[in-house]
Amino acid sequence: MNVCRTYKMGDNLVRALDDFSFSFNRGEYWAVMGSSGSGKSTLLNLLGCIDRPSSGTYLIGGEDISGLDDDELSDLRSRRLGFVFQSYNLIPQLNVLENILVPLFYQDEPPEEGEARALVLAERVGLADRLDHRPLQLSGGQQQRVAIARALINDPDLILADEATGNLDSRTALEILDLFDELHSEGKTILLVTHEEEVGARAEQVLQLRDGQIESVTKRTAETV
């Protein structure tokens, strides 16, 4: 609550997020929209515990993360958050199966259990026949499917997607959005950052940012589906 994130640029202090107070509830599907510089990426980085607020309180499942050190934040990310990025962020030296398993590398779990889940996820995203392929051997859409499977491997509380369809052709983008729809229908909490109106329209609710503040909140109705 009352979260601010400021950056010093030369002699100026820029408020990338300005007194932001909001709650994203379990099972919701949100699109966060706004023009360049509106605070979308800053909000995503804070929600994903990649960055820290300059002031204010951020709770995940009732837990105040402000007092956690870097190692504790890394552990929280690997257990409770799933990330899907525009540029996929796959590790080029690893194959599909290994990339899906990355969030589990530092968790105390029998390897065979994680691999069993990874195989199920690879099947779900249509890559069961590509397990030995490395990212450069895959299309953009296939790489993003790997990224989604990787985001799901830890059964996260929240999936954070940053312009997840930005590098994809329109047909592949629709396939990825269909997959997000399926995940939401199964109860997953999704926050999708996008500047594309047609992508944002797929979410249940839209949070519009402007100059680091909330400009509007829109909930889709049956007539807008």
Image (cartoon, rainbow, N blue to C red):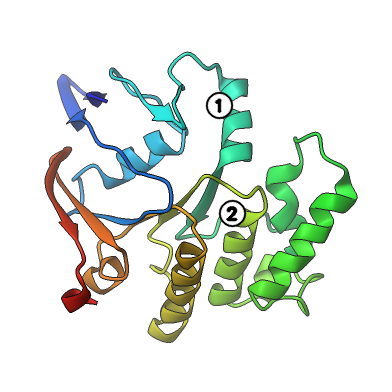
Q: Is residue 74 above or below residue 223?
A: above
Q: Is residue 89 above or below residue 211?
A: below
Q: Residue at x 43, y 73 (%)?
A: 177
Side (left or right) of 106 relative to 171: right
Mark 1 and mark 2 lie on one chain; the one further toward the N terminus is 1
Q: Secondary structure at mark 2?
A: helix
Q: Which mark is residue 73?
A: 1
Question: In which quadrant will I find the N terminus?
Answer: top left
Frontmost residue, 109 versus 101: 109
Residue labelled with disc 2: 151
Q: Secondary structure at mark 1?
A: helix
Q: Residue at x 33, y 21 (%)?
A: 57
Residue furthest left as drawn: 215
Side (left or right) of 158 relative to 92: left
Frontmost residue, 81 versus 28: 28
Q: Residue at x 27, y 46 (%)?
A: 40
Residue 148 lies in what quarter of the image? bottom right
